[in-house]
Image: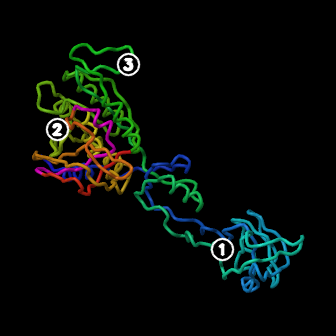
Amino acid sequence: MLELEQAVEKILGAIPSANSERVPLSEAHKRVATEPIIAAIDLPPFDNSSVDGYAVRASDVAQASSQSPVVLKLAGKVAAGENFSGELSAGQSIRIFTGSPLPVGADAVVMQEDTRVDGASEVCFLDSVKPWENVRFRGEDVKSGRTVVRQGEILGAAQLGLLAATGSMHVSAGRRPTVALIATGSELLEPVSEAKPAPGQIFESNRIALAPLITSAGGIPKVFPIVPDEPKATRDALARALSECDLVVTCGGVSVGEMDFVKSAFEELGGQLEFWKVAIKPGRPFVFGRKGDKLVFGLPGNPVSAFVTFLLLVRPAILRWQGASRTGLPVSVGVLTEPLSNQGDRRHFVRVMVDVKGEVRSSGTQASHVLSSLAMAQGLVDLPPATVLAAGTKVEVLRWE
């Protein structure tokens, strides 16, 4: 039985190099950059004003105050998007707006709140400015030629804004994998509105829960019909999924029971099992295998086990498949308001609630079939074996949203 880190290492080591595709910036949100992206221009591209006001020579208004105003001639106006063609001379000022290029000869901008306009040709200054006050310098944010996105970085909204501002309209991104979602179990029923479970039946919930997790990791989920607990049906479903998809995720049928056929069906198709047990709770029975360049992940059938093992073991694979350098879940730090106890011999990923103050407590019953405590949770706490964490302990919370 592998430790979690060993299992993740084996999985990530089996991921092929990402295939790149050219993507317009408008479609690049949450995509993974497969090469460094370099700024094509300085940002800002020119010296400009950070306020609405008047461009001046700072020395001309050095003695200005509300008690002793300084009057300068108004030599022109520069709106945003325009450029002053001349040069500011001593004793002059130029009307300027936020983002307007700084006229040649000016070295500061006085805010309009510190001025008073006297007629059409003069401005009265009621306060002084230091040289370069209220000026944003060319390249002070980003210099042309600087790396603004690293290879393997996931492109969020802020990164896209930076890329647009520095002139990148397309990026090279890792191709998104198509991920098959298969649920196995003769007891499972499609969750349709007119259906009612008969005794012994349950609504299937894993595919609907895992599909958005696949999407949020950058994969493209492809949901397959429920597969009954039959060797041929299991084998046929796996064969189809392997032919149509890059990655295959199954739920159920991976333990050692008489009706667990996923492992044997996969091997009959020529697949190679890499491992099938991980020392975590929930989710010890977990299959990872390869067939050529296709990867198969066999999750437990219990819904919480499927959810947790997906987050810990499948999500990193989907991200790395696209070339992501960082594949772990986001982490926040909180403080326990109650003890958390693990009396077992496996790490327990405890479902927890986190409030706005960062206070952390159990979200309820931790059994692997209890979905209500998963729905109440905002994250997981990794609790080592034979451990009790006291109230007041700082903990890291693994988040998925």
Q: Nearer the viewer, mark 2 or mark 1?
A: 1
> Mark 1 = which residue?
135
Seen at 19% across and 40% down, the residue is 282
Estimate how packed mark 1 is, as few (under 14), some (14 to 19) or many (20 or more) residues with alpha carbons within 10 Å: many
> Mark 3 = which residue?
192
Query: Can residue 52 be seen in this snapshot?
Result: yes
Q: Marks 2 and 1, Cα distance to the nearest angstrom?
A: 62 Å
Q: In terms of sequence position, does the residue under pointer 2 or pointer 3 come before the other?
A: 3
Seen at 64% across and 68% down, the residue is 45
Q: Toward the viewer: 89 or 218?
A: 89
Estimate how packed mark 2 is, as few (under 14), some (14 to 19) or many (20 or more) residues with alpha carbons within 10 Å: many
Q: Nearer the viewer, mark 2 or mark 3?
A: 3
- Which quadrant: the C terminus? top left
Q: Are marks 2 and 3 in contact (CB under 8 Å)?
A: no
Three-letter amino acid code at the position of disc 2: Pro
Q: Quadrant of residue 104?
A: bottom right
